[in-house]
Amino acid sequence: MRPLESRLRGLARRASKGDFAYLRARLGKLLWSEQRHVVLRRDLLATSPAAAARGRFTLRPLQPGDLEALSADLPAHQMPEIEKREYLLRNGLRGGHVAMLEDGRPCFIQWLLTASENALVKELFEGSLPEVDADTVLLEGAYTPPRFRRLPIMPAAMARLAEKGRDMSARWAIVCVGDDNPSMMKAAELAGFRPHELKIDRLRLFRRIVTHGEPALSG
Ligand SMILES: CC(C)(COP(=O)(O)OP(=O)(O)OC[C@H]1O[C@@H](n2cnc3c(N)ncnc32)[C@H](O)[C@@H]1OP(=O)(O)O)[C@@H](O)C(=O)NCCC(=O)NCCS
C-alpha cells in the first residue's frame, strides 16, 4: 500500500470511529501551524563516551514481532507511538533497529536511514525531515516504552546505532529533535550529537515552508 493510501485509510478509520477531535487537530495543523526542530549532528570520526556503555543491551535490526513486544503492557495513550512506527514498517522503511535487554526483551527502537531512503522518507514524513547526502545518515523514530525509560540505555544505543553509519561510509549522523523535547535533546547530546541548525516548518494552507537558522547553544 502506498503511503498516501495508507494515510487516507488511517484518516477514514479515525472518522469511522468518530475520532473527530483528532481529525480537527490534524486539519488545523495542515491549515496553519509551526514546528521548530533542532537538527543535531555527530561527527562519526569522533568517539562518544555513551557508546562505551556495555553489557546491558545488544543492538540488532528490527524483526517481526518486535513492535508487538515493545507494545506489551503499554498504557493506551502510548499506543499512537507504536502505530506511527507500524506505519513506517508497513510502508517498507528499512533500517529499523532495537536495543535488546539481556532477558531478550526489546526496550528501544530507532531507524538508521541513508540517502537511498530519501524518497520514501520524504513521502512518509510529508517532507518534514531533511534529505541526507551520501556521507550522512539520519536517525529517526526513537522510542522507549515508559517502563524502560531512564535505565539509561537509550543514549548508548543511539550512539552505537549512529556509529553503524561508519560501515555505510558516512562521516556524519544527524537527528531532528522537536525543541519541546528536552529528554531527546539530552539523550542525543549524550550520544555525541551537537546542535547544528534550527529548522522551522510552517504549514500554510496545506503548503510546507521550511526555513533554517542558527540553533540556540545548549548548556
Ligand atoms: C525521547 C526518548 C526516546 C528518551 O528515551 P529514554 O529511554 O527515556 O532515555 P534516557 O532516560 O536513557 O535518557 C534521557 C533522560 O535520561 C538522562 N540521562 C541518561 N543518561 C544519562 C547520563 N549518563 N547522565 C545524565 N543524564 C542521563 C537524560 O539526561 C534524560 O533525562 P530526563 O528525561 O529525565 O530529562 C523517550 O522519552 C521517548 O520514547 N519519548 C517519546 C518519543 C519521542 O519523543 N521520540 C523522539 C523523537 S525525535
Image: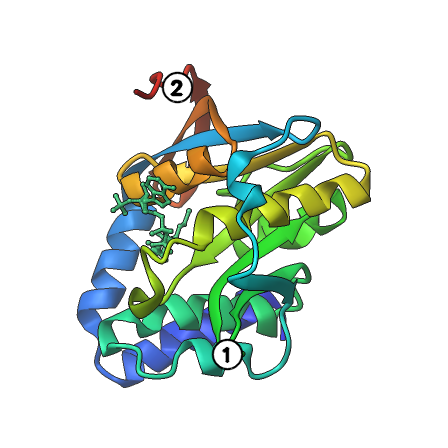
Name the disc covering residue 103, or none: 1
Q: Nearer the viewer, residue 169 or 138?
A: 169
Task: Give the amino acid type for the residue marked by disc 1 in the picture.
Answer: Asp
Q: Is residue 123 visible?
A: yes
For this orientation, the residue located farthest to the front is: 55
Residue 205 picture location, percent across and down: 34, 42
Q: Is residue 89 above or below residue 54?
A: below
Q: Residues within 10 Å of mark 2 (few under 14, many from 20)?
A: some
Residue 16 picture location, percent across and down: 30, 85
Residue 112 picture location, percent across and down: 63, 51
Residue that appears at 38% across and 78% down: 12
Task: Give the amino acid type for the residue marked by disc 2 in the picture.
Answer: Pro
Q: Nearer the viewer, residue 52 or 219?
A: 52
Q: Ligand 1 near label 2 (Cβ, under 8 Å)? A: no
Q: Give the left or right position of residue 80, taking residue 9 as reference.
A: left
Query: How is the model colour-coded?
Result: rainbow
Q: Residues within 10 Å of mark 1 (few under 14, many from 20)?
A: few
The reply to whether callout 1 and callout 2 are in contact (CB within 8 Å) is no
Q: Secondary structure at mark 1?
A: loop
Q: Nearer the viewer, residue 82 or 32?
A: 82
Question: The C terminus is located in which quarter?
Answer: top left
Q: Return the disc, 1 or 2, that comes first in the chain's sequence.
A: 1
Q: Give the left or right position of residue 24, taking residue 141 as reference.
A: left
Residue that appears at 65% across and 26% down: 46
Residue that appears at 42% across and 74% down: 10
- Residue where numbered disc 2 is placed: 215
Disc 1/disc 2 C-alpha distance (Å): 40 Å
Q: Is residue 181 visible?
A: no
Question: The N terminus is located in which quarter?
Answer: bottom right
Residue 8 picture location, percent across and down: 46, 71
Q: Secondary structure at mark 2?
A: loop
